[in-house]
Amino acid sequence: MRMYRPRNGGRRPHGSVHPGRPGAVGGEWMDHDSSRVTQSRPSTRAHGFSGNREYGVRAMRLCFLVEEQYRRDGMPVEVIRRLTDWGHRVDVVRPGTSLIPVSESIRAGSHDAWVLKTVSGGPGLTLLEAAAAVGLTTVNDARAIRGVRDKALAAAIGRSRGLPVPLTYAAADWRTLTEVPAECFPLVVKPADGSSGRDVHLVATPERLAEQAALSEQDGPAAHRGGGMLIAQPYVANDGTDLKVYSVAGDLYATQRRSPLHPDRSLPERRVELPREVAAIAARVGEVYGLDLYGLDVLLGPDGPVVVDVNDFPSFRQVPEAADRVASAVLRLARGRAAAPAVPALPAPRLAPQIPVTAGEDR
């Protein structure tokens, strides 16, 4: 755990405020799995997120489950820094590298909420589910996360609930995928537990798929990353760009970026206006999967928008003041102010203030 260590050996200087309460003079936070110390500092930024210091609201204790590869990533490192700057206590657990006393760390009343930022298939989700099992609040809802981290499961849930999700096939290996009907080609093949656009393949013809299957057999049954399920979906014709939509507890933002299937395309990531049709789909995604902090990849195909991926707690790149917004959302969700996940209906989606976009202009 990341534990608070006050300055002056635990003695508070005259006039100081107890660590962990709004207005605290600051201290040091130490990862329980590392001797490296990060200094917390009172924030000097002027922004519209002062609600986190509202009068009468007690400081909260939160636990972040953070995978090693996100140790220095802006999301969640900056979010954790904002929360500590605002006077809240944040413990950090690194599930991939730490011995965790589960019976002591995960118990009712230990934290106001547990927050997960780990790789798909990592051990963090089990700990989050354990926290939920003993009655702790989790962000996102622990019951919802497996439904999007397993892309085969996500496709089944989405199509059954009316989301525009491509027809999806699942198989344990490349050889079995050669049974996909020829009319479905070109195919997009990727690991069911993949993330960040890794190991995504565009397969033009059944013959190319057979070649890939032969290569995978030479490398052994676990040739694809992790050795888990593969999914295959018909390619959605598009201009080589992905529309990434982020939801911060109901507030929606959109960015445009190059598709991983078109690496030769030069397209810097930038904020764009969010079409209302896509905004409605994005809000519906949160309802269907029961998520509060999430992102979705949308392709604008010839037959309309298509959702090709959904992620819990994404990077929120290009979202203005992302760390402040996400930190504020975590506090609201921990306090129980957000609507419960998987409700029958959602209010109309709230679009963030839109920005004028000029063709070719980078933002």
Image (tube, helix red, strand yellow):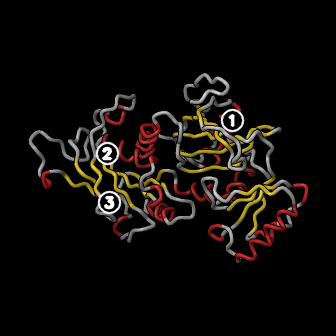
Question: At numbered mark 3, what does the secondary structure look like: helix, strand or loop?
Answer: loop
Q: Nearer the viewer, residue 56 or 267?
A: 267
Count of all numbered marks drawn on residues in the image? 3
Circle 2 sits in a helix, a strand or a loop, which is it? helix
> On the picture, is 209 further left or further right than 34?
right
Image spot of residue 33 (x, y percent): 34, 65
- Residue shown at 31%/50% (left/top)? 89
Please tell me whether residue 161 is drawn above or below residue 348 in the rendered image: below
Q: Position of residue 146 (x, y in %)?
A: 59, 59
Q: Is residue 94 left or right of residue 313?
A: left
Judging by the rendered image, the residue that carries numbered circle 1 is: 278
Label 1 packing within 10 angstroms: few (<14), some (14-19), many (20+): many
User: What secondary structure is found at the residue carrying circle 1?
Assistant: helix
Q: Which residue is mark 3?
A: 31
**What mark, if any, has residue 84 been given in the picture?**
2
Q: Are marks 3 and 2 in contact (CB under 8 Å)?
A: no
Mark 2 to mark 1: distance in Å? 35 Å
Measure the alpha-carbon separation of dots 3 and 2.
14 Å
Q: Is residue 94 left or right of residue 276?
A: left
Q: Is residue 165 visible?
A: yes
Q: Is residue 337 visible?
A: no
Give the vertical position of 178 relative to 244 (above or below). below
Q: Residue at x 76, y 67 (%)?
A: 171
